[in-house]
Image (cartoon, grey):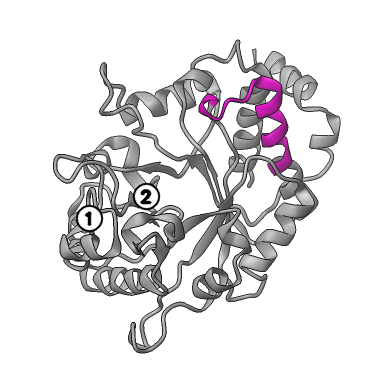
């Protein structure tokens, strides 16, 4: 069976993909939204999702993203194998299962009026008290496009970095010493003002000078680009240096993007090519977006894509 699987990967991925070793800096591999279906009817828990990913040797993972505190109490998050997402302005004003500093807020004013600053402290306290501590905090996806950080549809400068500052203060208070990261859209990663905020953080008027107000890791989501564009974009967003921010790659892994198997495989292939072509790039984490039962549990319909996802995971995490 193992020989058949290896042969399948070789045929579907191609000899060129195997020619070079992957980037040795990569420490983590997994999926966003491990608990995507936890509130669906019928529900499909993060536990069941991980079984679907790892079952029959399909794909190793060591850092999957969950979006609820309840998921942090599940065995699938033991040993720091889950990152936890904190959102701003998602879902309903009340009753949302997600960790959110201002559920339902549609502006910076309404977010702060809902108690966003205190909510950050409360969220970190609950994370610290969870049965299983997360391996990282995924703090506000695409922050510059989030209405809860905007006034009249325009992002309020330094709002995100100010929240990062408060997040770090709370983490220090409650003994949560893990990386913070965010993912930007391709458009955000080409905006000089927003890049500067991600790199330099908030001014001293918004955050004490002794508190870091920038994320430790940054990523970019773009499901239609080239290896060369990926390289230049990440270098512009987080220039390589010994103390620089680490990179999170975000390959697509869902049918919800409207791609067929060949199209999805081609986009995933770009990321495999990237980490082989740039083995010294500071890539720390590959976070597939997202866990999708239509792909993971429907491998006959996505044979090329799922074979490549499996091969990439098992190759990276099997490194000595």
Q: Nearer the viewer, residue 118 or 48?
A: 118
Q: Is residue 32 above or below residue 162?
A: above
The reply to whether residue 281 is in sight is no
- Give the side of residue 1 with respect to residue 16, left or right: left
- Give the side of residue 20 with respect to residue 80, left or right: right
Please name the residue shown 66% across and 37% down the image: 315
Please name the residue shown 55% across and 55% down the image: 219
Please name the residue shown 33% across and 87% down the image: 208
Q: Quadrant of the N terminus?
A: top right
Instruction: Measuring from the top left, give residue 187's x and y in whole percent.
Output: 59, 56
Instruction: Measuring from the top left, give residue 261's x and y in whole percent.
Output: 66, 20
- The disc at residue 174 is none
Q: Which residue is mark 1?
A: 102
The reply to whether residue 299 is in sight is yes
Magenta stretch: give its range. Answer: 255-271
Instruction: Measuring from the top left, give residue 115's x and y in whole percent.
Output: 16, 64
Please name the residue shown 53% across and 21% down the image: 295
Instruction: Measuring from the top left, give residue 183's x and y in whole percent.
Output: 50, 54
Snapshot quadrant of residue 5: top right
Asked if the magenta segment contains residue 266, the reply would be: yes
């Amino acid at each position: 069976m193992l020989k058949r699987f290896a042969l399948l990967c070789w045929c579907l991925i191609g000899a060129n993909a195997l020619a070079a070793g992957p980037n040795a800096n990569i420490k983590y591999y997994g999926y966003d939204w491990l608990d995507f279906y936890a509130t669906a009817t019928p529900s499909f828990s993060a536990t069941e999702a991980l079984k679907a990913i790892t079952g029959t040797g399909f794909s190793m993972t060591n850092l999957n993203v969950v979006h609820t505190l309840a998921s942090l109490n599940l065995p699938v998050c033991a040993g720091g194998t889950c990152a936890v997402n904190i959102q701003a302005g998602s879902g309903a004003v009340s009753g949302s299962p997600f960790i959110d500093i201002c559920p339902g807020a549609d502006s910076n004013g309404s977010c702060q009026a809902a108690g966003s600053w205190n909510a950050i402290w409360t969220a970190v306290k609950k994370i610290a008290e969870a049965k299983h501590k997360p391996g990282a905090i995924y703090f506000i996806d695409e922050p510059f496009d989030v209405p809860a950080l905007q006034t009249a549809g325009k992002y309020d400068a330094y709002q995100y970095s100010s929240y990062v500052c408060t997040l770090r203060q709370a983490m220090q208070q409650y003994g949560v010493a893990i990386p913070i990261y965010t993912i930007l859209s391709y458009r955000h990663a080409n905006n000089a003002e927003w890049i500067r905020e991600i790199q330099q953080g908030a001014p001293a008027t918004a955050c004490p000078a002794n508190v870091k107000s920038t994320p430790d890791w940054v990523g970019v989501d773009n499901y239609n680009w080239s290896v060369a564009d990926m390289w230049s974009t990440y270098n512009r967003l987080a220039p390589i240096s010994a103390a620089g921010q680490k990179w999170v790659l975000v390959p697509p892994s869902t049918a919800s993007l409207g791609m067929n198997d060949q199209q999805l495989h081609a986009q995933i292939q770009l990321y495999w090519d990237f980490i082989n072509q740039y083995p010294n790039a500071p890539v720390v984490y590959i976070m597939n977006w997202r866990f999708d039962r239509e792909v993971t549990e429907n491998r006959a319909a996505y044979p090329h894509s799922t074979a490549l996802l499996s091969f990439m995971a098992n190759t990276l995490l099997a490194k000595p």
